[in-house]
């Protein structure tokens, strides 16, 4: 038999080459930023009923009750008028009681699940509710301008802000001013927050610090503490060890819609893409495959990686990797510094996505 008719062993690698995050430089129009202010895909189907409180943490059960009542109280007309805003109408009296709630707790206790459940439970059309991270909200202001953002969000019944960032004083003042305008317009608020630099404690952000930072808005927020362990690791198996470069590469080729990138090159690419575009960077991806995972070299790079990890987690995109395990991404100095909560959240989320990726590697 000639060599031309002798077929080699079937390769597990498909014909189509995988995608590359490093080859993508997406542009995101302002109207997409507004339209995407809804709970991310991972939280499309979450509800209060699907939140599983830890029986050892009664504050979790209490949080569900309080937030359910808060959502029910947002029914009916917009606080500043019925239906479309009548700018010429007499301004009604401000609603009694706090028009905002702050979810105070560590990473992994389900704050985002509860925040998204509040969004879903609020009896209003989707276009009357907005949900986004602090970064996405500041990006919206940058795209639309402050006054247009006030006009756009001022017609909403509820604004949910996940991961309210207090480590940038300028952005904190900007968003606090924006929220003041929205409260005046009758918009209800809900927020979770990260840790201020220097707040090392237990990996959670104290409600008193949050309320002090937003100063004049303090009276509008009811703090709601949620205690507990990181649910992503509660009762779950250990995260899988990293795979070899060869296995990761083969899995990328064999998985339709997967991307394949060298980790150091990806970190360099993230520096050239604004974090507001990281969601678009992952459009249509079914898996992210990374080779040669190494410790991140500096804090700026680490913070960009945190944003990417959040967007991957939101979109439930599994991550298969070779090199070092994800719990070795950040140095001890970083994990003991002011941004420690962000880094632990990223480790937690990437570890969960690594578990999801185990099925990409054949037995």
Image (cartoon, grey):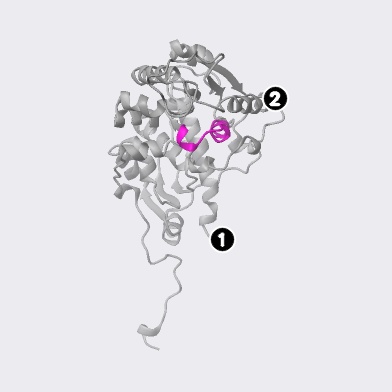
Residue closest to the eye, 301 or 106: 106
- Considering every residue shown, the one lying at the far right of the view is 55
Residue 3 vs residue 178, the one in the foreground:
178
Quarter of the figure with residue 51: top right
Q: Is residue 295 visible?
A: no
* Element at label 1: loop
Q: CA distance from mark 2 to mark 1?
A: 42 Å
Give the image location of residue 337, x and y in percent: 44, 22
The structure residue drawn at horizontal position 45% and vertical position 42%, both measured from the top left corner, is 312
- Single out the mark in the foreground, 2 or 1: 2
Apparent side of residue 362 relative to residue 172 in the rendered image (left or right): right
* Label 2 neighbour load within 10 Å: few <14, some 14-19, many 20+: few
Q: Secondary structure at mark 2?
A: helix
Residue 232 is situated, as x and y percent measured from the top left of the image, at 58, 37
Task: Please tell me in which quadrant of the rendered image residue 225 appears.
Answer: top right
User: Which residue is label 2 attached to?
Assistant: 58
Vertical side of 10 occupied by 208: above or below: above
* Among the 4 quarters of the image, the one containing residue 5: bottom left
Looking at this view, is 175 or 252 the one in front?
Answer: 175
Q: Which residue is mark 1?
A: 363
Determine if the magenta segment contains residue 115.
yes
Please provide the residue range marked out in magenta: 112-130
């Amino acid at each position: 038999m000639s060599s031309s008719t002798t077929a080699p062993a079937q390769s597990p690698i498909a014909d189509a080459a995988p995608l590359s995050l490093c080859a993508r430089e997406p542009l995101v129009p302002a109207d997409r930023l507004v339209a995407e202010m809804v709970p991310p895909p991972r939280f499309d189907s979450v509800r209060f009923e699907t939140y599983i409180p830890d029986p050892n943490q009664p504050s979790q059960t209490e949080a569900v009750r309080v937030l359910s009542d808060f959502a029910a109280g947002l029914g009916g007309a917009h606080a500043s008028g019925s239906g479309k805003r009548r700018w010429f109408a007499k301004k009604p009296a401000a609603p009694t009681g706090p028009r905002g709630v702050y979810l105070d707790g560590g990473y992994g206790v389900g704050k985002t699940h509860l925040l998204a459940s509040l969004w879903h439970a609020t009896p209003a059309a989707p276009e009357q509710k907005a949900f986004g991270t602090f970064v996405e909200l500041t990006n919206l202001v940058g795209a639309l301008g402050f006054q247009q953002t006030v006009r756009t969000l001022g017609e909403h019944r509820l604004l949910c802000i996940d991961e309210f960032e207090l480590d940038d004083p300028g952005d904190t003042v900007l968003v606090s001013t924006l929220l003041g305008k929205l409260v005046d317009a009758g918009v209800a608020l809900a927020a979770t927050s990260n840790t201020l630099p220097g707040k090392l404690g237990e990996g959670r952000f104290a409600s008193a610090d949050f309320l002090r930072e937003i100063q004049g808005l303090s009276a509008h927020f009811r703090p709601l503490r949620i205690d507990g362990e990181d649910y992503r690791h509660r009762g779950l198996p250990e995260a899988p060890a990293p795979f070899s470069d060869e296995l990761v590469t083969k899995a990328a080729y064999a998985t339709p819609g997967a991307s394949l990138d060298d980790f150091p090159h990806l970190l360099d690419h993230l520096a050239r893409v604004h974090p507001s575009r990281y969601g678009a960077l992952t459009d249509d991806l079914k898996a992210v495959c990374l080779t040669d995972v190494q410790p991140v070299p500096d804090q700026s790079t680490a913070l960009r990686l945190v944003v990417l990890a959040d967007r991957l987690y939101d979109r439930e995109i599994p991550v298969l990797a070779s090199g070092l395990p994800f719990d070795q991404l950040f140095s001890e100095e970083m994990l003991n510094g002011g941004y420690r909560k962000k880094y632990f959240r990223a480790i937690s989320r990437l570890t969960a996505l690594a578990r999801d990726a185990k099925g990409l590697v054949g037995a």
